[in-house]
Image (cartoon, coloured by chain):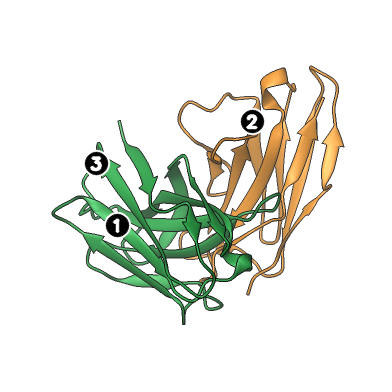
């Protein structure tokens, strides 16, 4: 199995400040044939299902505010919220979909104000 | 607009079978662009992928659950299902169904999620 490790487990950020979440994969998620990294980011608010934010490591899902961005390649990835808003309080998960089965998620990072 | 809705018993006895159905509306389950998956979340914990199925019946299962899991598609009803046999307390979770983008070879990210259904395992 591919292990996905997120850091930190939780972070508190002031409103309007930048929040960065790291995700490290135990194996590379980069496929050279199509030049893509097989990594997604999800946001889960309390009592709600997860919501797709980013796929292919850096492609923002339609309707997702542009303050959310994804970066990285290979085994190291970052989700950045450029200016934290109150509605961004949630748990964030990364997920790899390159090495399967199983598809694996990170343990989650809780973002608070 | 695509909508996924899980349904099934909220309480299952230990050693019995958990059966859930995901009804798909707003899209055809026979779309060649998607797999259909099940993901669960134990109380207070993270997300666990269970398995995915294509409209043709092709499946991928988590190896740790493979001996207990069966997924199926009902094209006439536009729904797909999950069966998990011999459940234990460790199978208690919120179960989500989801749509997974695909190249038609293997599933990718989950772009639409159902609201989830809570399953308790208790006698």
Seen in the image, is A58 located left or right of residue B5? Answer: right
Quarter of the image for residue A13 reads top right
Q: Please determine if labels 3 and 1 lie on a single subunit.
A: yes
Q: Position of residue B43 (x, y in %)?
A: 66, 51
Q: Please determine if labels 2 and 1 lie on a single subunit.
A: no
Q: Under tag 1, what secondary structure?
A: strand
Task: Kindly identify the residue that appears in the image at 31 percent across and 62 percent down.
Answer: B104
Q: CA distance from mark 2 to mark 3?
A: 28 Å
Seen from the viewer's position, the closer of residues A29 and B110 is B110
Q: Mark 1, chain letter? A: B
Q: Quadrant of the C terminus of chain A?
A: top right
2 vs 1, front mark: 1
Seen from the viewer's position, the closer of residues A108 and B14 is B14
Dot 3: within a 10 Å radius of its alpha carbon, few (fewer than 14), some, or many (20 or more) residues? few
Residue corresponding to mark 1: B80
Dot 1: within a 10 Å radius of its alpha carbon, few (fewer than 14), some, or many (20 or more) residues? many
Q: Under tag 3, what secondary structure?
A: loop
Dot 2: within a 10 Å radius of its alpha carbon, few (fewer than 14), some, or many (20 or more) residues? many
Is any atom of residue A38 visible in this view? no
Seen in the image, is A85 located left or right of residue B36? Answer: right
Q: CA distance from mark 3 to mark 1?
A: 13 Å
Residue corresponding to mark 3: B27
* Count of all numbered marks drawn on residues in the image: 3
Residue corresponding to mark 2: A68
Q: Colour of chain B?
A: green
Seen from the viewer's position, the closer of residues A69 and B46 is B46
Q: Mark 2, chain letter? A: A
3 vs 1, front mark: 1
Q: Position of residue B52 (x, y in %)?
A: 40, 63
Chain identifier matching the orange colour in the rendered picture: A
Q: Mark 3, chain letter? A: B
């Amino acid at each position: 199995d591919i292990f996905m490790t997120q850091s930190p487990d939780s972070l508190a950020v002031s409103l309007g400040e930048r929040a960065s979440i790291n995700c490290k994969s135990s194996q590379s998620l980069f496929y050279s044939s199509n030049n893509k990294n097989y990594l997604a980011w999800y946001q889960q608010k309390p009592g709600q299902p997860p919501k797709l934010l980013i796929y292919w490591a850096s492609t923002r899902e339609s309707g997702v505010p542009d303050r959310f961005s994804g970066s990285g390649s290979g085994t190291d990835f970052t989700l950045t919220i450029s200016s934290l808003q109150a509605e961004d309080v949630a748990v964030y998960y990364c997920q790899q979909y390159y090495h399967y089965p199983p598809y694996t998620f990170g343990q989650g990072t809780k973002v608070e104000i | 607009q695509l909508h996924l809705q899980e349904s099934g018993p909220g309480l299952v006895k230990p050693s019995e079978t958990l059966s859930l159905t995901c009804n798909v509306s707003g899209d055809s389950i026979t779309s060649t662009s998607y797999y259909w998956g099940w993901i669960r979340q134990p109380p207070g914990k993270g997300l666990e992928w269970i398995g995915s199925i294509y409209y043709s019946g092709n499946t991928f299962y988590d190896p740790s659950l493979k001996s207990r899991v069966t997924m199926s598609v009902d094209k006439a009803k536009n729904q797909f299902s999950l069966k998990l046999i011999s459940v234990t307390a460790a199978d208690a979770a919120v179960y989500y169904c989801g749509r997974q983008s695909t190249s038609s070879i293997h599933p990718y990210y989950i772009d639409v999620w159902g609201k989830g259904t809570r399953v308790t395992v208790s006698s």
